[in-house]
């Protein structure tokens, strides 16, 4: 059976920048607090007429163009998002139509900040099973639509963006491609990070709007502690069961939720010097952080063909995921 490898990457970041200084004018906060407690200096915000599928389409087009692959050759599209354009049709359907990917099926994958790691793993198995030759995995979130810009504890954290990777069979014997994945969900953490209303439990009503229940609500310190511990545990288990040590890892590309979460997990893994942090420029873009960070790692010359890369994420749910890949290009 063929192994799966990542063969290209495309990203889209909306041009409008919201700086910490801008936020100082909106809520009771300051640049020093935000930088010290989160590592974030600025984030990008989509214009009002731009939805998640628009950013997803741009990122997907970029990934396909980089590889010279026509959209008609794509077999499946997985859009990882918690901010779809609407409940249905899925964002994957909207992306398929805009790309003209007439041979593709697809679906949206809801795993919050772990979405992209889950999407990559799903694609690796579709390709690795031999039934799919080209799978597009897209992480796209327009968090600014579900963030309460009166809540200083959440509004400083998030930004908007999209990233896409193309997964294809790894032919030949160079060992590149997908190696392994560790995942876990823990629904007992569901109350610590959620958007309470808008679904079948609490459909939209005047009350839910008045009570600001269509926004992200979180217990930051609970999420923080869980994220550090689980990112470390998932990463360690992945290495251990593959007979690897941290010395084998070329780079850790973690979900970017908070610079202190990343630093603490990286330190426990012994990967402080080999961890990509770019949260200062984008904030937490949820399903898009890993492709954006991968792009930066490539541009900085820190990720090259043959390197062992670990992706790791913890998100709302809770969801946890980490995967190992031998970089293929
Ligand atoms: C949200 C987070 C940055 C808060 O940092 P923290 O060090 O835990 O801070 P606390 O929540 O304990 O708040 C400390 C104080 O700062 C205040 N504060 C919160 N947000 C603030 C802001 N933007 N500016 C200034 N002060 C702020 C709080 O009100 C609190 O004040 P108090 O002590 O008077 O009550 C941090 O908990 C975090 O990043 N958690 C994880 C969130 C996350 O990753 N979510 C996505 C998951 S993938």
Image (tube, rainbow, N blue to C red):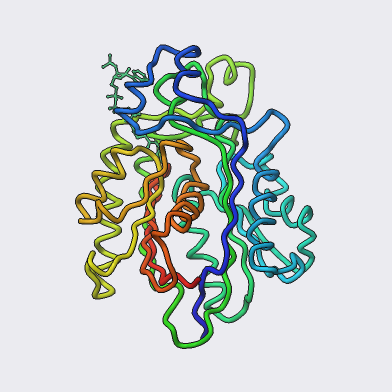
Coordinates of residue 264 in the picture (x, y in percent): 24, 44
Coordinates of residue 266 in the picture (x, y in percent): 26, 51
Rendering quarter of residue 284: top left
Q: Is residue 172 above or below residue 59?
A: below
Give the camera-side residue of 169 and 113.
Answer: 169
Regarding ligand 1, which quadrant of the image does it lie in? top left
Rendering quarter of residue 297: bottom left
Q: Is residue 260 above or below residue 275?
A: above
Q: Is residue 307 left or right of residue 222?
A: right
Rendering quarter of residue 323: bottom left
Q: Is residue 179 above or below residue 198?
A: below
Residue, x 50% and y 49% (percent of image)?
292
Give the camera-side residue of 34 and 201.
Answer: 34
Coordinates of residue 295 in the picture (x, y in percent): 50, 54
Coordinates of residue 163 in the picture (x, y in percent): 57, 51
Q: Is residue 243 above or below residue 200?
A: below
Residue, x 59% and y 19% (percent of image)?
209
Residue, x 33% and y 37% (percent of image)?
223
Give the camera-side residue of 271 and 2.
Answer: 271
Q: Is residue 48 left or right of residue 305?
A: right
Residue, x 47% and y 47% (percent of image)?
289
All told, the count of numbered labels is: 0
């Amino acid at each position: 059976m063929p192994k799966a490898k990542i063969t290209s990457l495309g990203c889209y970041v909306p041009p409008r920048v919201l700086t910490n200084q801008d936020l100082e004018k909106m809520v009771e906060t300051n640049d020093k607090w935000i930088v010290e407690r989160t590592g974030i200096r600025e984030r990008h915000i989509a214009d009002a007429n731009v939805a998640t599928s628009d950013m997803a389409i741009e990122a997907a087009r970029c990934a396909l163009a980089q590889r010279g692959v026509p959209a008609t050759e794509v077999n499946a599209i997985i859009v990882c998002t918690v901010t779809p354009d609407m409940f249905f049709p899925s964002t994957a359907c909207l992306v398929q139509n805009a790309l003209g990917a007439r041979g593709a099926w697809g679906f949206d994958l809801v795993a919050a900040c772990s979405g992209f790691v889950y999407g990559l793993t799903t694609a690796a198995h579709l390709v690795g099973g031999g039934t799919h030759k080209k799978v597009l995995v897209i992480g796209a979130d327009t968090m600014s639509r579900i963030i309460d810009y009166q809540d200083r504890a959440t509004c400083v954290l998030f930004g908007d963006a999209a990233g896409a990777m193309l997964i294809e069979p790894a032919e030949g014997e160079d060992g590149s491609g997908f190696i392994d994945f560790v995942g876990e969900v823990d629904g007992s953490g569901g109350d610590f990070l959620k958007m309470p209303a808008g679904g079948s439990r609490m459909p939209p009503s005047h009350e839910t709007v008045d009570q600001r229940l269509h926004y992200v609500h979180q217990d930051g310190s609970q999420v923080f502690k869980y994220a550090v511990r689980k990112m470390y545990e998932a990463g360690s288990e992945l290495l251990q069961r593959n007979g690897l040590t941290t010395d084998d890892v070329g780079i850790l590309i973690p979900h970017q939720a908070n610079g202190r979460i990343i630093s603490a997990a990286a330190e426990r893994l012994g990967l402080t010097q080999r961890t990509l942090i770019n949260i200062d420029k984008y904030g937490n873009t949820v399903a898009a952080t890993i492709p954006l960070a991968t792009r930066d790692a490539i541009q900085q010359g820190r990720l090259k063909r043959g390197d062992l890369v670990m992706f790791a994420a913890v998100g709302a749910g809770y969801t946890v995921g980490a995967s190992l890949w031998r970089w293929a290009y």
